[in-house]
Image (cartoon, rainbow, N blue to C red):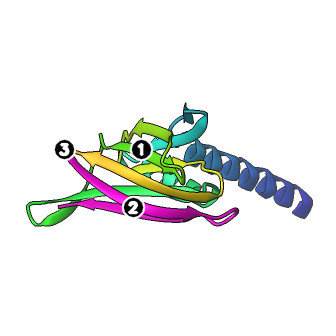
Amino acid sequence: MKTLFKSSTLALLTTLSLLIGGTAHAQIPATQHANGISYITGGVGEEESLAIVAEAKQWPLFLELSQLENGRGVWIFGANIKILNSKQQVVFEAQAEGPYMLINLDAGDYSIEASYQGVVQKRAINVKANTPQKVSIFWK
């Protein structure tokens, strides 16, 4: 009887683990490509936001986009993200479909030009191999 209980419990735990893992993974928006660089953008809704934040550890660059509205910070979508290499050549350009963007950049020096409602924010970044980094861009 003990063996049956253990087998049933193990089967139940395995099934629950697959269901929970599958649910979190299913909430991540589809990977897209711009100029040959893969990226994920989104973060609308709590489940999608949590899934992207969890996935961010696997990506070289995690952008977080927000603005000040009525005295408090709010997430935005629709920002245009342009990334230039050290030679000032555009290597990536896409529109953010939510407050988060994961971008698969090679190691190197880059500058980010993020534009939202006519206001451009610029950041210099250094992407290192196997070292994910988060860059928060905030509009006032």
Determine crowd level at label 2: few under 14, some 14-19, many 20+ residues with C-alpha closer than 10 A. Answer: few
Give the camera-side residue of 13 and 88: 88
Q: Which amino acid, mark 3?
A: Gly
Determine crowd level at label 3: few under 14, some 14-19, many 20+ residues with C-alpha closer than 10 A. Answer: few
Query: Which quadrant of the figure contains the C terminus?
Result: bottom left
Instruction: Name the N-terminal-most of marks 2 and 3.
Output: 3
Q: Which quarter of the picture shows residue 127?
A: bottom right
Determine crowd level at label 1: few under 14, some 14-19, many 20+ residues with C-alpha closer than 10 A. Answer: some
Instruction: Name the N-terminal-most of marks 3 and 1.
Output: 1
Q: Which amino acid, mark 2?
A: Arg
SS class of the residue under badge 3?
Answer: loop
Q: Which numbered circle lies on residue 82?
A: 1
Q: Is residue 132 magenta?
A: yes
Q: Give the residue drawn at x 50%, y 40%.
A: 92
Span shown in magenta: 117-140
Give the camera-side residue of 50 and 82: 82
**In the image, is residue 39 above or below residue 109?**
above
Is any part of residue 79 visible from this angle? Answer: yes
Q: Which amino acid, mark 1?
A: Lys
Q: Give the residue drawn at x 72%, y 56%.
A: 13
Q: List x then y, in percent, for residue 29.
A: 50, 38
Distance, label 2 to label 3, CA atoms, is 17 Å
Q: List x then y, in percent, for residue 119.
A: 20, 50
Q: Which numbered circle lies on residue 120?
A: none
- Tag 2 residue: 123
SS class of the residue under badge 1?
Answer: strand
- Tag 3 residue: 118
Distance, label 2 to label 1, CA atoms, is 11 Å
Distance, label 3 to label 1, CA atoms, is 14 Å
Give the camera-side residue of 84 and 100: 84
